[in-house]
Image: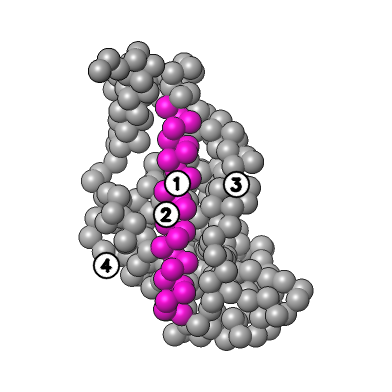
């Protein structure tokens, strides 16, 4: 069976994308842990709790578990109470050429009965923005010495390369949904905070990162039942295990 020239080009682009994505990396799986809010940005505030404090506590606990897992490299957008701009959070992930981006938040609602955890993936309504980010991030190639040899003709300005980027973009969304499913399944099976499922929304920090990623709402800070789990050491440990175990499972299946 003859393979069309177009299919050959697509396969070649995928190989080139793999070359670009792995260039300069170790053999480790790179995970970005992003504790939502921080510094002058408190996030939601209910029952004497600030979202920025709860997200940081859980994020550090997730990191502590993952640090004990072989071949995982962690990068934190923040490890203290500091303000990090959204665009810088995305840049940290893109500069590291990370394998996963994990952003941790707490939900809130004026209706105090709302409760449960949700995991968000990139909304396709802004997928084109993410594609433009991919093109922009890859354009730095031209600033490197001997880029023609290093990247074997990869050119983010060529139409055939755009096809490759689109394929990678679709693959990232599929991978994000896979990870989100693992996270929510773990929430359903292991902690007091119920699962509200997976949602797809055009959240900027997910749209601006060029790898699979999720934003996790670990519970409602505005709900008394959820917050009793969110503010407790045992509750935070359970939430962290649910997230970390999902990441480890995803890594083992895909890396």
In the displayed structure, would residue 195 be above or below residue 15?
below
The x and y percentages for residue 60 are: 43, 69
Which of label 4 and label 2 is nearer to you?
Answer: 2
Name the residue: 48% across, 31% down: 166
Kind of element beneath mark 1? helix
The quadrant in which residue 113 appears is bottom right
Tell me the residue that label 4 is attached to. 68
Task: Work out whether mark 2 precedes mark 3 in sequence or the reverse, and give the earlier one.
Answer: 3
The x and y percentages for residue 73 are: 31, 54
Tell me the residue that label 1 is attached to. 174
Label 4 crowd (10 A; few <14 / some 14-19 / many >=20): few
Image check: 168 left or right of 85? Answer: left
Q: CA distance from mark 2 to mark 3?
A: 15 Å
Q: Which mark is residue 178?
A: 2
Task: Work out whether mark 4 precedes mark 1 in sequence or the reverse, and give the earlier one.
Answer: 4
Label 3 crowd (10 A; few <14 / some 14-19 / many >=20): some
Tell me the residue that label 3 is attached to. 123
User: Dominant secondary structure of the magenta stretch?
Assistant: helix
Name the residue: 54% across, 52% down: 121
Task: Work out whether mark 3 precedes mark 4 in sequence or the reverse, and give the earlier one.
Answer: 4
Task: Work out whether mark 4 precedes mark 2 in sequence or the reverse, and give the earlier one.
Answer: 4
Q: CA distance from mark 3 to mark 4?
A: 33 Å
Q: Is residue 33 visible?
A: no
Q: CA distance from mark 1 to mark 3?
A: 12 Å
Q: Which residues are magenta?
A: 164-191
Name the residue: 60% across, 35% down: 129
In the displayed structure, would residue 98 be above or below residue 56?
above
Kind of element beneath mark 4? loop
């Amino acid at each position: 069976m003859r393979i069309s020239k177009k299919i050959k080009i697509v396969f070649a682009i995928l190989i080139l994308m793999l070359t670009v994505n792995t260039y300069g990396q170790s053999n480790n799986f790179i995970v970005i842990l992003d504790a939502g809010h921080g510094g002058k940005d408190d996030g939601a505030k209910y029952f004497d709790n600030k979202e920025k404090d709860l997200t940081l506590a859980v994020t550090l606990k997730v990191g502590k578990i993952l640090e004990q897992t072989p071949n995982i490299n962690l990068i934190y957008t923040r490890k203290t109470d500091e303000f990090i701009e959204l665009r810088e959070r995305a840049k940290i992930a893109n500069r590291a050429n990370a394998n996963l981006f994990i952003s941790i938040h707490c939900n809130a609602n004026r209706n105090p009965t709302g409760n449960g955890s949700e995991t968000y993936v990139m909304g396709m309504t802004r997928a084109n923005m993410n594609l433009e980010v991919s093109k922009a991030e890859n354009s730095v190639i031209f600033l490197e010495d001997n880029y023609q040899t290093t990247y074997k003709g990869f050119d983010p300005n060529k139409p055939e390369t755009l096809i490759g980027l689109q394929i990678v973009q679709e693959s990232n969304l599929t991978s994000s949904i896979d990870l989100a499913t693992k996270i929510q399944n773990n929430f359903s099976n292991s902690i007091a905070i119920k699962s509200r499922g997976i949602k797809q929304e055009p959240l900027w920090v997910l749209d601006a990162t060029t790898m699979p990623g999720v934003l996790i709402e670990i519970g409602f800070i505005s709900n008394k039942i959820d917050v009793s789990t969110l503010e407790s050491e045992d509750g935070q440990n359970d939430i962290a295990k649910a997230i970390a175990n999902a990441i480890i499972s995803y890594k083992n299946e895909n890396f």
